[in-house]
Amino acid sequence: MSTEEKSATPRSLAEALRVRDDASLAALLRSRPDLITPVPTDLTQLATRAATRASVVRALERLDRFALQTAEALAVAADPAPYDELLRLMAGDPGPATDPAVAAALPRSLAVLREQALVWGADDRLRLVRTARELLAPSPQHPSPTGLGPTVREATAGMSPGRIQELLAAVGLPSTHDSVSAVSALGTLFTDRPRMTELLAALPEESREVLARLVWGPPYGQVTHDPAPHLRALLDRGLLLPTAPGTVVLPREVALHLREGRAHRAPEPVPPPVEAAAAHRPRVVDATAAGQALAALATVEELLKEWDEGGPAVLRAGGLSVRDLKRTAVALDVTEPVAAFWVELAYAAGLIAADGQADERYAATPAYDEWRELPTAERWAGLAEAWLTATRTPGVVGGRDAKDRTLSALGPNLDRSAAPEVRQRVLALLAGLPEGASPTEESVLARLRWERPLRGPQRETREPREEDLRSRLARWTLSEAELLGVTGRGALAAPGRALIGAPEPVRPAPEAAESEGPGDKLPVHHRALPSPLPATPAEQAAATAAAARLIAPLFPEPLDHVLLQADLTAVAPGPLERPLADLLGVLADVESKGGATVYRFTPGSVRRALDAGRTAADLHAVLARHSRTPVPQPLTYLIDDVARRHGLLRVGAASAYVRCDDDATLDEILADKRAAGLGLRRLAPTVLAAQADPAALLEGLRAIGFAPAAESAAGDVLIARADAHRTPPRTPPVPVPEGPPVPDDTLLTAAIRAVRAGDLASTAPRKPGPGEGGAPAAGELPRTGAAETLATMQAAVMTGEALWIGYVNAEGAASQRVVAPIRVEGGFVTAYDHTADEVRTYPLHRITGVAELADDAL
């Protein structure tokens, strides 16, 4: 390498960053946003931050499998390593066994590592960041996923010089004068393929079988104090080296020879495709999704209706009790995990919250009343957006936290920062399939595992383990998207595509589109979805509005009529207008739900409507107006009969009393054995007194078969319309982000400009001051007296030269700046600040010192 080439080769990560252009630095900060919080003062600080353990671990966790395999290969390669050595480790030794797919994908993988500042240096001197090498290199405590062990030099570090010379003699090498050269000679032999082939061919078959068992890892094995002859042959030749009493290891050079140079047994350069299980007509998918969306809205409304007067109590530790979750599941006619999903969805959308009272309970928020008045499509889109962006994960309800406490719905510790990213990625994979195609679950999980294989500093590759969180989040996403109507029959619907900002779908061939068999296996090839997905709140709001526009035509228009049947039922053939739906919700009981809702009229439901202030005439008029069929005579008789008896008995508060103009009715009550528990006694021919309170007396008489009405102290009938209980205004739970947010273009531009200017200030060459032996060292603030600082500033104003100054702001933070003074007066200097790229004014007493820049500094 020539002197010019050596000077052009970066000697550190900071120097490698210094030669990058702004687009490359922006890509680095976008892929690793933790590096920009706070903004580094210069590129040296940026490089230092990029090499910290926490930042490197976070960057490694976001690599795909092949990029991670490339980093793992560099961790076992020489430091620095030429590109050809990396290629051999990834694709195998040159020859027929070389994997062309790996060779083709390696430049892209290396570019990703370079972009994220995990690898730096030219192709002939590739260096993995030291922290990443420490995390990924093999060690007895943390075996490498490559299955490789230590090098010969590392494995013989504690071996006696005499023993090393014995190894040289056993393999036919001349002895040396020192251990360093002996180890080097042994390592050279193990990397010489022809000589190694001869050495291994001379071994017994049992010895080669031992090497075959260790070659792909783990490279460690156990031996006794008196090894068998076939093991002794390996130990004498250094093909197995002792690391501890009774433990031997296969040296890395030997393993690579046996692997034909490969670091990994199965490199994965290409992501696994997402396979289609079946294809459906897009219209069928959209219609199915719209039906699910309507059912989702009905379920959320039913949940809030259950909690309208005040829901379950809040546990002391927060959340719903197991009993209350079971009750909610029974009320919604769903399983408990599904009930937890609907409860958490309503909470994420800001529709329910704790009321904050002394006896704290869950209830609807004021936002629920506003949400109910929105158009159907906007109500669904609001729920879908809340689900897509929420970090609260209902799937973990019922599990255990780190302290072995049960995780409850609406309770703490349900946030999983990776949830929004996984949901969006799963939907993006579905969007990459042809329109109407539903994927196989396992292919989706395999793709996600390829995209994010690493969890923590090391990856377990051989021990069986519990399914990782991202896989569980993906499974929950597929089921929750179907419940919510984002997908239909497993395929992403058009509103779901719009929700994630996906491009227009690829239309399948007509013959494929006609397939409706759920088991049809179709050779659909997945295409990568262009990025980025909606990243900012504004982009997500636009995507949500687009989803609402697409799903609105799929919803049927609300109906203003029902079909009354002679069996005291009413059939709603579709969604009803809200006033009619609210009336039927009081006047009748829901018997079945689905595409059509069946309501049943009972004496209790009619009495409920009368208690709410309706009259028999009102009910007859409303039913006649909204029924497409004649009002059945049994229903007319039922309403009239309940209305005739309604209020005949009056219950008021004394302790409680019963008043009735018909004393025979009171005699009937007193004679009924079921009324014994009410403690009734006659005060007057038309009045009974009771020991029970008015509410218990009302329920007791109704259980016997009467229809009493409550009355006020003035004797007026009290309307039993339930008062809706609302919490004070509440904001929806804020998602817990997974690390710092990705910076936008404006922030990136400003940050890069500040880092560049700070780097200029810290690295610009300076002239030595008067009487100094040299310029101030880089990173040190200049130190000059007040008189010298003032004189230098005034001279720079006359000559127009730039100066290097040290400055301490009002908060005490010191910085270096390159400025061109414009005016000095009144104890202040006005100058063009090259660091901030603007004109600023600085108090002279806050300038620590000043130095002139070299002539070619700017």
Image (cartoon, rainbow, N blue to C red):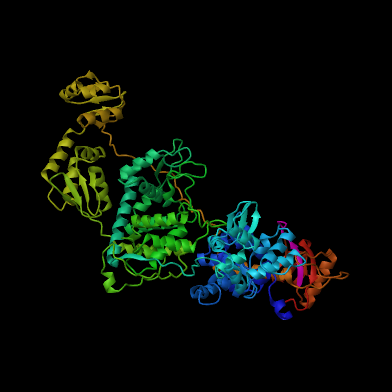
- Residue 260, by quadrant, is bottom right
Residue 347 place in picture, x, y as percent = 42, 49
Residue 250 vs residue 578, the one in the foreground? 250
- Asked whether the viewer can see residue 379, the reply is no
For residue 487, what is the image quadrant?
bottom left
Does the stretch in magenta take in 811?
A: yes
In the picture, the quarter occupied by the N terminus is bottom right
Residue 444 is left or right of residue 253, and the answer is left
Identity of the residue furthest to the left in this view: 633
Q: Is residue 550 above or below residue 795?
A: above
Between 475 and 574, the one lying in front of the other is 475
Give the percent coordinates (x, y) of residue 753. Answer: 63, 70
Give the residue drawn at x 43%, y 54%. Answer: 472
The image shows residue 476 at horizontal and vertical percentages of 40, 54
Seen from the viewer's position, the closer of residues 655 and 222 is: 222
What residue sits 25% from the left and 52% below the top? 594
- Above or below, 701 against 76 in this view is above
Looking at the image, residue 631 sits to the left or right of residue 500; the answer is left
Q: Is residue 804 left or right of residue 333?
A: right
Which residue appears farthest toward the right when viewing the image? Answer: 771
Q: Is residue 21 left or right of residue 630?
A: right
Specify start and end residues of the magenta stretch as a single range: 803-813
Where does residue 587 sit, x and y in percent of width and height?
23, 43
Quarter placement of the C terminus: bottom right
Image quadrant assignment for residue 196: bottom right
Residue 824 magenta-drawn?
Answer: no
